[in-house]
Image (spheres, coloured by chain):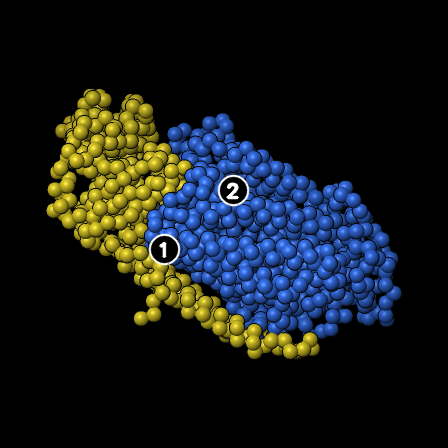
Amino acid sequence: MESKETTNTTKIKVRHFPLDENPPHHYANWQKGIKSWLTTKDHKRIGIMYLATITLVFLFAGTMAILIRLSLWNPANHIVAAKTYNILFTLHGTMMIFLFLVPGVPTTLGNFFIPMMIGAKDVAFPRLNLASYYIYLTGAIFTVWAIIHGGVDTGWTFYTPYSIQSTTHVLPMTIGIFIIGFSSILTGLNFIVTLHKLRAPGMSWGKLPLFCWGIYATSIIQVLATPVLAITLSLLIMERVLHVGIFNPALGGDPILYQHFFWFYSHPAVYIMIVPGFGIISELIGTFSKKRVFGYWFIAISSLAISFLGFLVWGHHMFVSGQSALASTVFSLITFLIGIPTGIKIFNWLATMYKGSIWLTTPMLYALSFIFLFTIGGITGIMLGALSVDVQLHATYYVVAHFHYVMFGGMLIAFIGGLHYWWPKMTGKMYSETMGKISWFFIFVGFNVTFFPQFILGAKGMPRRYYNYLPQFETLHRTSTVGSWILATGFLIMAGYLIYSLAKGEKAPSNPWGARTLEWMTASPPIHSNFNYIPVVTHEPYDFHRPVSEFQLGLVGSEENGHDGGNGATSPDGGTPVVADESQS
Amino acid sequence: MFNLGKYFLPPAKSTFAHNTDALFNFITNTGALLLLGIVVVMIYFVIKYRRRSDDDVTSLVDHNTTLEIVWTVIPLILVLVIFSWGFKGYYTLFTPPQDSYEINVTAQQWLWKFHYKNGKTTINKLYVPAGRDVKLIMTSKDVIHSLFIPDFRVKHDVLPDKYEELWFNAKKPGHANLFCTQYCGQGHSNMHADVIIESQKKFNAWLKKGANGSSGGNGKPQGMSQAAYGKQLYQKNGCSSCHSTDGSKGVGPSWKGIFGHKVTFKDGSSKTVDENYIRQSILNPGAKVVKGFNNVMPTFQGVLNSDQISAIIAYIKTLK
């Protein structure tokens, strides 16, 4: 896999390229106007466009969640009608999962930082990258159409035969998700090729930052699993439109078959959502402990192992569905095995902090919260994998709480941590640390107040997707609803100080956290071509014992030739090449 | 004793609830200890190794084989224990004892119907005898539902195209809640039934009070037993012209003693006759034809509804 410049026998000349802090022309302003954004092939601009889009989705789906919690204030519900309530939780689930969590980290932070972290000028297929965005947008338009025309009430799982019988807008919604799937496949494909072919000279697999490993494992799942979702949804559409009997028993179909198909994608999909989070946490813990990440290879390879094993556990969603008991047993066993590498990552991150130099910034607070919340999510996952106990907990609030601890407490918390970590690089502005910590406090406390009571509710027997509930559950439901308000307050504060930072924030230095990975070895915000030289990598990504300057080496003469990253994007005049000190060997 | 599980679980009202609860408690307690350990270590590190200056020099340690083996093997042993424990409970849960008292359940949007052997039918009220193994034989009229009795620690999906079974043994007279846990549309959360556990004596007395029970409205005469209704359907629908009930061979196999009996099919495979096989043979007779007979039977799809098929099965069961 190594490019030929880096084989042991070839010597290359490198020299130190000092940084140009806060250049007047950078990726966001070297071309102006809305058209330059909408037609851009720059991975960084596409990343920002995705970020803006999925923030809107998050805002919308989050509002649905607040309304759901509000509706559950009373046991006998009077705030919205039953059908509206069913539409609310379906939209919350569908939007959050297919439009926010799945594309979440890869399309935003991944798009922006993967090429920079490996010293490339762009992804392998920049035009395809832009196409992915528009495919995503097209899919999103279908779902918006479905929402405007009255929504969908099947739950995000679209279980048959209910989804065939339902008179709501199942069709446009599933077509939308079908289309978005292609965007996911193409993004995954793009990253796989990028990581294989565009690494800077000297960047062997062992010098790849762990965020890249996370995205690499995720991309493999995206490419392999998403087609199954497309097949499932096409079959569902065929059944609804053409009345071909596949899942509907009235037409001779088998409803359990649908569940197998659906979870064959949707279980790997939870790893699409969480594995990039593992990558972010590794970056944060390493940088803010100023220490080499403990068990680098374990963390890297276990992400790959999880992505393969993740294909073999889908049946643990179906222990009480009527699938064979033998199948359930095998699925339960593999589920436990996949828990081991995941658990060991937690120990690795803790061990990374040992004898480190821990800087408790906002991103680090999120990383530590991740460890806490994800451990709870993991333990309750073990609980749900245990066959006899799952019989009690399946389809109750216990599952809802577990899912939110791994998805919100895991993926979203990691995402927010990453967003704060890379915010100075993306925007060239610092955010307010004080406000960051205040908002973290609200989010952390709010999250636990919202979701912890749901574990108790579920174990006691409160089924999920219930519009009415028995009076005995009222106190716990009300606690959870109050939690959702604390949580929302945290997000509003965050929106406030991030917007303020964009407008009036302090200028960010190129490397505010003292990190050693390549994305920090260029200006904040970066110039259009990322680096004005070809970076050469000589050290591991978390080698904090070496000075930052040793991470800013480039090929001698490369500033004249431009970057032969092989991606065809034109090299603009992003900044003048720097006349440097003496070259090093 | 240190036990966090009790803050989570509802009262245990069935004989095997303690098994599920013991495992739940084990995972909760072990998990809580693990979490506590992680939090303590994390906070200790954050304080002890806090950044004092930007020039802090950190340790070079980035692996420790012994430590890594320990933290791989211990969790592995723990999860294998949990796996075996859960597996054992699960098999008990889904293996109904031989002489269980059978109740047929029909789920539909959005109510539960319970059919007792003597023909009594109740809606959203499940009467069960205490201290006796009870088996529910469940099917759905429309979409997928799921029958969940939290206090018994049992749950199983109820499917529209086949029968699913579930059993329990309620310890003492009392009440329990029964929920639908598979989302089934607008009235999903109203699909709630009361489980009324009576002593065997009271239960028998209740069962005899036929007048109290409502008919399911499926064409079955008030108070007639399932099996008697099945016999009536057997005669009315012309089954009797091909299937005898005395063991003599007709156009089709005799029903006498066929339930629970192993039969060999034309393709050489064999199967023990159960509810699902009979249902399949009524709705799709050509799927599995018994060796020595021809595929001449018409389908009864759309002729007999689920309740009527259940009644016929009940009748076949009496033909020993």
Compared to A10, does A332 lie above or below?
Answer: above
Instruction: Identify whether B192 is placed above or below B245.
Output: below
Q: Please, what is the three-letter code of the amino acid marked with disc 1?
A: Ala
Residue type marked 2 = Leu
Return the chain for callout 2: A
The answer to whether dots 2 and 1 both sit on one chain is yes
Residue A503 % position (x, y): 73, 56
In the rendered structure, the answer to whether residue A547 lies left or right of residue B120 reads right
Side of A480 where A552 appears, left or right:
right
Q: Secondary structure at mark 2?
A: helix
What residue does disc 1 label?
A459
Asked whether residue A201 appears in the rendered view, the answer is no
Tag on residue A127?
none
Neighbourhood count class around disc 2 (C-alpha, 10 Å): few under 14, some 14–19, many 20 upward: many
Q: Does residue B282 lie above or below A365 as drawn?
A: above
> Mark 2 vs mark 1: which is more N-terminal?
2
Crowd rating for badge 1 (residues with CA inside 10 Å; few <14, some 14–19, many 20+): many
Do callouts 2 and 1 mark residues in contact (Cβ within 8 Å)? Answer: no
Residue for point 72% across, 60% down: A505
Residue A366 image position (x, y, % from top left): 57, 63
Q: Does A529 sit left or right of B231 as displayed?
A: right
Residue at (45% x, 41% y) in the render: A80
Residue A524 is situated, as x and y percent measured from the top left of the image, at: 75, 60
Colour blue maps to chain: A
Chain that bears disc 1: A
Q: Toward which corner of the image does residue A132 lie, by quadrant?
A: top right
Question: In front: B185, or A339?
Answer: B185
Instruction: Residue A242: tell me if it is visible.
Output: yes
Q: Which mark is residue A91?
A: 2
Q: Colour of chain B?
A: yellow
Rounded to the nearest whole Å, what is the CA distance between mark 2 and mark 1?
A: 26 Å
